Image: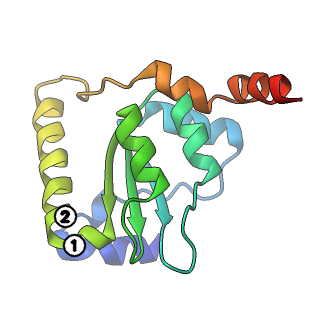
Amino acid sequence: ATFLKAQAQPYNMEECIVPHGRLSRKDCLALQSDSRFLLLSTWNDKREKGVFPGKFLEYMLLEKPIIAVVSGNLGESEVAQVMKETRLGFCFEEVDGKAGEEKLFAYLCQDWNRCRKGLPPDFHPKKDVIRQYDWEYLIEKFEELV
């Protein structure tokens, strides 16, 4: 929490950081369910590309907008591609630099305006595409192959 608060301090947002400590899976899912957005952090670089966190699959099932942050020196990550095809939220890739930061800022400002008006996030995921990443669907496809 100290590290996150230090990162938030230059933006006067350290009060927004609420450390919850270690949580049970049940409590973690409840907290995620109550959140407006889910934050996914991953990386994509020339040494390790194609990183696709299991947490991303879990987030897909929660039917909440995801803000994915992809660090690294390689663009067009698999996470960014899936975010785009499923319309699950916004993906910021570090390699996009200032232009990417400005798009993320615009996305957050747009939602902040919706939130102040009591409106839900502008979220219209492609459920038929998301289904392709569901464990039951993947198991069906695996059984067909076997």
Quarter of the image where one finds residue 114? top left
Image coords of residue 140 (percent x, y): 77, 22
What residue appears at the point 56 percent right and 80 percent down from the top-left corner?
47
Camera-side residue: 11 or 68? 68
Picture quarter with the C terminus:
top right
Image coords of residue 74 (percent x, y): 40, 72
Does the rendering let one see residue 144?
yes
In the displayed structure, 108 sits above or below 144; it is below
Kindly check if marks 1 and 2 are in contact, taking CB atoms under 8 A apart as contact.
yes
**Which residue is farthest right?**
146
Measure the alpha-carbon separation of dots 1 and 2. Answer: 6 Å
Q: Residues within 10 Å of mark 2 (few under 14, many from 20)?
A: some
In the displayed structure, 16 sits above or below 138; it is below
In the displayed structure, 119 sits above or below 106; it is above
Q: Which residue is mark 1?
A: 97
Mark number for residue 101?
A: 2
Does the rendering let one see residue 37?
no
Q: How many marks?
A: 2
Quarter of the image where one finds residue 122? top left
Q: Is residue 146 left or right of residue 28?
A: right
Which three-letter amino acid code belongs to the residue tagged 1?
A: Gly
